[in-house]
Image: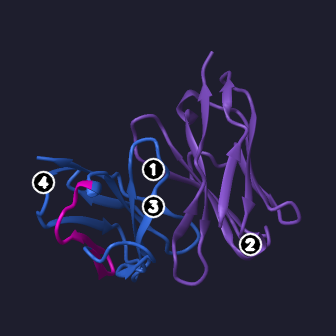
Amino acid sequence: EVQLVESGGGLVQPGGSLRLSCAASGLTFSSYWMHWVRQAPGKGLVWVSRITNDGTGTSYADSVKGRFTISRDNAKNTLYLQMNSLRAEDTAVYYCAREGGGEVAFDCWGQGTLVTVSS
Amino acid sequence: DIQMAQSPSTLSASVGDRVTITCRASQGINSWLAWYQQKPGKAPKLLIYKASSLESGVPSRFSGSGSGTEFTLTISSLQPDDFATYYCQQYNGYSRTFGQGTKLEIK
C-alpha cells in the first residue's frame, strides 16, 4: 500500500523557519515527481511547489518563491519543504502529493501537517 | 501562470440529482485537467484525470469532459456520500493550479 506521511508542522513565530518532511512507503519513490499543496483553514487548495523525480528540477508558487525550498532524498524515500521567513498567511495544512506516472495527476496524498504562524 | 475559474462556488442538490460543475482555464491546457473530491478534515481524492479518465475505484456516476479551456465534471445521480467539496486542477507545464472549489450541499 502506498503511504505518504507528513511531519514537522507546528507553531512558529512570524519570520521563523520550519522544515516539513514527507516519508513515502510502498512505492518506488525515485520514479515520481512530488508536490506540496497547502490549505489555509476554511479555504481552498493551493499548489506550493514541485520537484522532479531525480531532484534536478523545481518550481514554486509566486507566493513562496525565494522563501521555501523543496528537496528530496531518494535514498531515504523522503520529501522535504524548508520554509523560511514565515508569515501569518502561510498558516495552513500542508499536504505532500505524488504525481502519478504518465497522464495521471495527484493520485496519492498524505494526511497533512498543520503549520501555524503566529506570535 | 495559468488561472482556473470554477463555478458555481456552492451547489445545492438532492440525492438522485444530476449535477455539473464547470472549470475554465485562462489559457489552453489541452486535456491536462484533473478533478478531486475533498471531505472535511481529509486529504483530497483523485476522481478524474486527463479531463475524462476515471481513476481506478471511482464510481462510474462520475464523469469528466472538455479540452482546451472548458471542462466539466458531472455526477449522474447524486449519492449521500457525494456531498463534499470538488476542485479542478490543471497540470500543464511545470506549475499546477487548483480552482477555488465547489461545495456540494444537500438541498
Determine the colour of chain B. blue
Q: Callout 1, which amino acid?
A: Leu
Whether labels 4 and 3 belong to a single chain: the reply is yes
Q: Quadrant of the C terminus of chain A?
A: top right
Label 3: few (<14), some (14–19) or many (≥20) C-alpha neighbours in 10 Å? some
Spatial separation of the CA atoms under disc 3 and disc 2: 22 Å
Q: Callout 2, which amino acid?
A: Asn
Q: Are marks 4 and 1 in contact (CB under 8 Å)?
A: no
Q: Callout 3, which amino acid?
A: Lys
Spatial separation of the CA atoms under disc 2 and disc 4: 42 Å
- Lower sequence index among marks 4 and 3: 4
Q: Report in which chain the residue with disc 3 lies.
A: B
Find the magenta span and give its range.
B62-80
Could you say which disc has been placed on residue A45 in the image?
1
Percent x, y of residue B82: 27, 57
Spatial separation of the CA atoms under disc 3 and disc 1: 12 Å
Residue B88 placement, left or right of A108 = left
